Each structure stands twice: as structure tokens, then as C-alpha cells.
């Protein structure tokens, strides 16, 4: 699958971000069981049709890899494992070596409910306490929270994920004081009003295709895009973790370990679930 994935990422470097994010959205809702890949049916609205998941991407690449794998060895590799591998392989492309080991053996779930996304996925306006609670409910620590937030070193965001910080932070037409004023001024030139829901911008401007620890430098300059990013500076423990991540080799070592922990959240094993034949529908 590596060859197919790298072929896609080589042709479109922006693919790494959605593929990395897909694994996060999968694991936080019903565990890493590929429930995020299931299509809605006549009597069920699936996760991918809930608002936070409407900005996901990379589904077609996962489907292509699954088709290839089913041809070569039918019924062996789960869609959940493909998502976990694709997250690792897509950010590894830049380095032409695999950045961490992925544990395999996940099985695919058969249930996907849109309503469970809001209940399980932390939104961008969460504060530190809420983020800590969200991660801890998945067996993840503040350390994991800080390290995995480093994923925001690649990819884009739409204006509604942060524009309240620019135009109406406390409902009085004000700006978030924890956001760097010059950076806020720049962001306002991109997101011109609260009604702009189509503009996308790089979360790590100028370096949004490079998977590295630059996110933490921005964060300490008060240029983290979301309140959830800025929240990492509000507690001593997480602030210390942020500072450790300024050393590149710490970030790379810790990111792989935290991804492995996230990739273990509520996984189905043994005879639980199934190995889907096609990732968008249950067998
Ligand atoms: C800590 C809690 C987190 C929050 C609140 C959060 C929130 C968000 C939001 C709001 C967006 C932009 C969506 C849009 O407007 O288009 C985004 C993008 C992204 N997130 Fe997170 N995220 C979190 C953690 C993570 C984790 C753990 C990962 C992966 C390990 C991740 C990977 C990404 C990536 C790669 C993008 C860019 C996607 C693209 O360019 O298509 N995020 N996140
Ligand atoms: C959805 O509807 C179909 C046909 O109407 C039915 O066979 C299936 O069991 C239903 N699924 C659920 C989860 O209710
Ligand atoms: C975080 O948000 C929750 C829910 O809105 C609120 O009760 C709590 O006081 C906030 N914590 C901090 C430290 O701002
Ligand atoms: C700002 O927030 C307040 C309180 O939520 C709301 O009443 C007001 O309409 C908002 N302003 C704009 C421009 O959306």
C-alpha cells in the first residue's frame, strides 16, 4: 500500500493532512474501527455526514488502497488498519522513511452515527480543562494532547473554526486577547467576516506541507489558530510539554508514541467486528 499512497501524496502534497486527521476522527468516535469511513444509509446518518467530519478528505485514496489489498489478499487487512497506516505513511513521505511503527490487527466496526461525533470529538473552542477531559476519556494524557496537537503543523482550516477569536470572542464584537494582535490582523484579511465559511487557510503559514515541529514555535508566539491550540499555553504542565517539543528530535520521538497510543483507542480485535470488503459499507 505504501507505493500507492506515496504515489498519491507525491502528486498532491496536501493529501497528507486529511489522511492524518482521518485517523484522529476515526479513533475518537467508537475507537479506531473505520466507522468514519461508512456512508450514510436510508435509515442512518453516518459520522462522515456530521458537521465536524464534512471537512475530512482522503476517502478515495483509502478506497483505492482497499481495492488493491482485497485483490492481493482478500479479507485480511481491515479498513481501520489502512487508516492507521495511511496516517503514518502520508507524513512519512517527505522523509522517505517510515516515522513510526504502526501496530496492526484492528477490526472494522459496523456502526457509524453522526450524533456520536459531536459527543466525542473535541471542538476548536475547547479550553484546557475540556481538552484534558476529552483526551482522558480516550485513555490519553495531557502529554498526548500536546504532542498530537502538533499535527496542526500541516493542513488547512476554514474560517468558522476560529473566526469568533477575530470578531466576537465574548459576544461583544471583541478579539481574543490571547491571540497575537498582528497575527489576528493578518487573519482578518483572510477571513473578512463571520459569514465567510468557504475560505481556507494554512494553519502553519508557509510551512503547511512540512510535517515538523514548527507548530510549537507559532504557538509560543501566540499564533496558534484555534482556542484549543492556545489553551496548551494556559497550564504549566502543558506549557512545559510545548517547550520540550521545540527540540525537533523530541517531537518526532514523542509523536510516533502518542500516535500509537491514539491508534489503540477502543480497538476491536479477535472476532469482534469484521474485515470490511469495501470501506464505505458494512459487509
Ligand atoms: C486537540 C484537539 C483538536 C482539535 C480541537 C482539532 C480541531 C481541528 C479543526 C477545527 C480543524 C480545521 C477544520 C476546518 O475548519 O477545515 C483541524 C484540522 C486538522 N487537524 Fe485537528 N484538532 C485536534 C486534534 C488533532 C489531532 C490529534 C490530529 C492528528 C493527530 C489533528 C490533525 C489535523 C489536521 C492534519 C488538520 C488539517 C486537515 C486538512 O488540511 O484537511 N488534529 N483540527
Ligand atoms: C435500515 O433499513 C433497512 C431496509 O429498510 C433494514 O433492512 C435495516 O435493518 C435497517 N437498519 C437499521 C440499522 O435499522
Ligand atoms: C472551561 O470551560 C468550561 C465549560 O464551558 C467551564 O466550566 C470552565 O470554567 C472553563 N475552564 C477554564 C479554566 O476557563
Ligand atoms: C456576537 O455574539 C453575540 C452573543 O453571542 C451575538 O448576540 C451577536 O449577534 C454576535 N455578533 C455577530 C456579528 O455575529
Image (tube, helix red, strand yellow):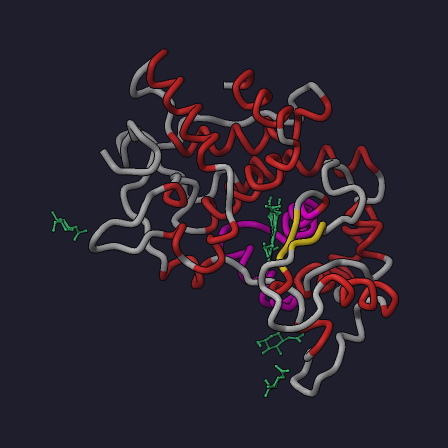
Q: How many numbered discs, if any?
A: 0
Picture quadrant of residue 92: top right
Residue 146 sits inside the magenta stretch: yes
Picture quadrant of residue 276: top left
Which residues are the magenta region? 125-152
Picture quadrant of residue 95: top right
Q: Position of residue 226 (x, y in %)?
A: 68, 62
Magenta segment, prevailing SS (helix, strand or loop): helix
> Is 239 situated above or below 256?
below
Q: Position of residue 87 (x, y in %)?
A: 56, 34
Residue at position x 66%, y 24% in the image: 93
Quick one: 7 or 77, which is closer to the camera?
Answer: 7
Residue at position x 71%, y 72% in the image: 165
- In the drawing, does residue 75 fall left or right of residue 120? left
Q: Position of residue 37 (x, y in %)?
A: 39, 41
- In the drawing, does residue 203 fall left or right of residue 30? right
Extreme-bottom residue of the structure:
172
Residue 71 sits inside the magenta stretch: no
Residue at position x 30%, y 17% in the image: 74
Q: Position of residue 274 (x, y in %)?
A: 27, 32
Quick one: 32 or 79, which is closer to the camera?
Answer: 79
> Is 49 situated above or below 5?
below
- In the drawing, does residue 250 fall left or right of residue 275? right
Amino acid at each position: 500500500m505504501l507505493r500507492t499512497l506515496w504515489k498519491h501524496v507525491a502528486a498532491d502534497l496536501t493529501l497528507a493532512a486529511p489522511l492524518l486527521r482521518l485517523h484522529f476522527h476515526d479513533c475518537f468516535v467508537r475507537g479506531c474501527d473505520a466507522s468514519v469511513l461508512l456512508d450514510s444509509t436510508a435509515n442512518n446518518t453516518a459520522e462522515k455526514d456530521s458537521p465536524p467530519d464534512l471537512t475530512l478528505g482522503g476517502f478515495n485514496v483509502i478506497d483505492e488502497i482497499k481495492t488493491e489489498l482485497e485483490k492481493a489478499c482478500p479479507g485480511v487487512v481491515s479498513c481501520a488498519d489502512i487508516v492507521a497506516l495511511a496516517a503514518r505513511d502520508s507524513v512519512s513521505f517527505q522523509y522517505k522513511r517510515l516515522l513510526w511503527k504502526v501496530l496492526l490487527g484492528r477490526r472494522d466496526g459496523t456502526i457509524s452515527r453522526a450524533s456520536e461525533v459531536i459527543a466525542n470529538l473535541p471542538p476548536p473552542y475547547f479550553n484546557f480543562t475540556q481538552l484534558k477531559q476529552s483526551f482522558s476519556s480516550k485513555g490519553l494524557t495531557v502529554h498526548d494532547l500536546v504532542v498530537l496537537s502538533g499535527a496542526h503543523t500541516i493542513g488547512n482550516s476554514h474560517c468558522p473554526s476560529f473566526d469568533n477569536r477575530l470578531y466576537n470572542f465574548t459576544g461583544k464584537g471583541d478579539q481574543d486577547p490571547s491571540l497575537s494582535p498582528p497575527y489576528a490582523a493578518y487573519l482578518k484579511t483572510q477571513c473578512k467576516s463571520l459569514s465567510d465559511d468557504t475560505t481556507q487557510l494554512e494553519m502553519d503559514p508557509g510551512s503547511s506541507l512540512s510535517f515538523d515541529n514548527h507548530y510549537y514555535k507559532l504557538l509560543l508566539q501566540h499564533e496558534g489558530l484555534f482556542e484549543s491550540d492556545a489553551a496548551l499555553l494556559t497550564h504549566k504542565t502543558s506549557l512545559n510539554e510545548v517547550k520540550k517539543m521545540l527540540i525537533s528530535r523530541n517531537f518526532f520521538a514523542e509523536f510516533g508514541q502518542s500516535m500509537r497510543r491514539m491508534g489503540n483507542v477502543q480497538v476491536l480485535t479477535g472476532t469482534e467486528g469484521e474485515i470490511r470488503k469495501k470501506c464505505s459499507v458494512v459487509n
